[in-house]
Amino acid sequence: MIKFVIPTVLIAALFTPQAIAASCVLPVPDGGEIDPSPPSVKGVISKVAGHEIRLREQKSKPIKVVKETELFTVYGGSVEPEELKKGQHVFVWYVGCKKVHDVTPVAAIIQLCSIAAEPCIK
């Protein structure tokens, strides 16, 4: 029988704050027990077209909104994709929390400050 020994140092390294911070933690409606990763981007919607949004702060680069994209306000209320409008302030988490170069990013989470075009008080 072969036994594998995992050094205690390796196990400890996997659970350091740096290792945990490297993971992607998406926000959940009405909060959660674990703080989410910072949003991939945040800003004001400048355009809504089909299944894409663009933010002023992203120099008109599109962000895909797919059927798996979760939408809710910072207060936890559900939002429908049809409610996305120009002027709304949003936080966006990409799938995996990172943009892949040369590929249009896909939104995992879009969190609105308000259905009305109001800035967040965060």
Image: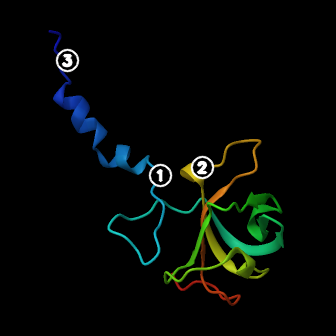
Q: Residue at x 63, y 85 (%)?
A: 119
State the residue position of label 3.
Answer: 4
Colouring style: rainbow
Task: Judge from the rendering whether residue 30 lies leftward or rightward of residue 41; answer left or right.
Answer: left
Mark 2 packing: few (<14 Cα in 10 Å), some, or many (20+)? Answer: some
Which of discs 2 and 3 lies nearer the camera? The answer is 3
> Mark 2 and 1 residues: CB-CB less than 8 Å, in contact?
yes
Mark 1 packing: few (<14 Cα in 10 Å), some, or many (20+)? Answer: some
Query: Dot 2: what SS?
Result: loop
Query: Dot 3: what SS?
Result: loop
Sequence-first tag of 2 and 1: 1
Q: Position of residue 118 (x, y in %)?
A: 66, 89
Q: Quadrant of residue 12?
A: top left
User: What's the residue type where badge 3 is placed?
Assistant: Phe
Q: Quadrant of residue 114?
A: bottom right
State the residue position of label 2.
Answer: 98
Q: Position of residue 22 (x, y in %)?
A: 44, 46
State the residue position of label 1.
Answer: 24
User: What's the residue type where badge 2 is placed?
Assistant: Lys
User: Which is nearer the eye, 83 or 118?
Assistant: 83
**Residue at mark 3 to residue at mark 1: CA–CA distance:** 29 Å
Q: Residue at x 60, y 49 (%)?
A: 98
Sequence-first tag of 2 and 3: 3
**Residue at mark 2 to residue at mark 3: CA–CA distance:** 34 Å
Query: Dot 1: what SS?
Result: loop
Tell me if residue 114 comes above or below residue 93 in the rendering.
Answer: below
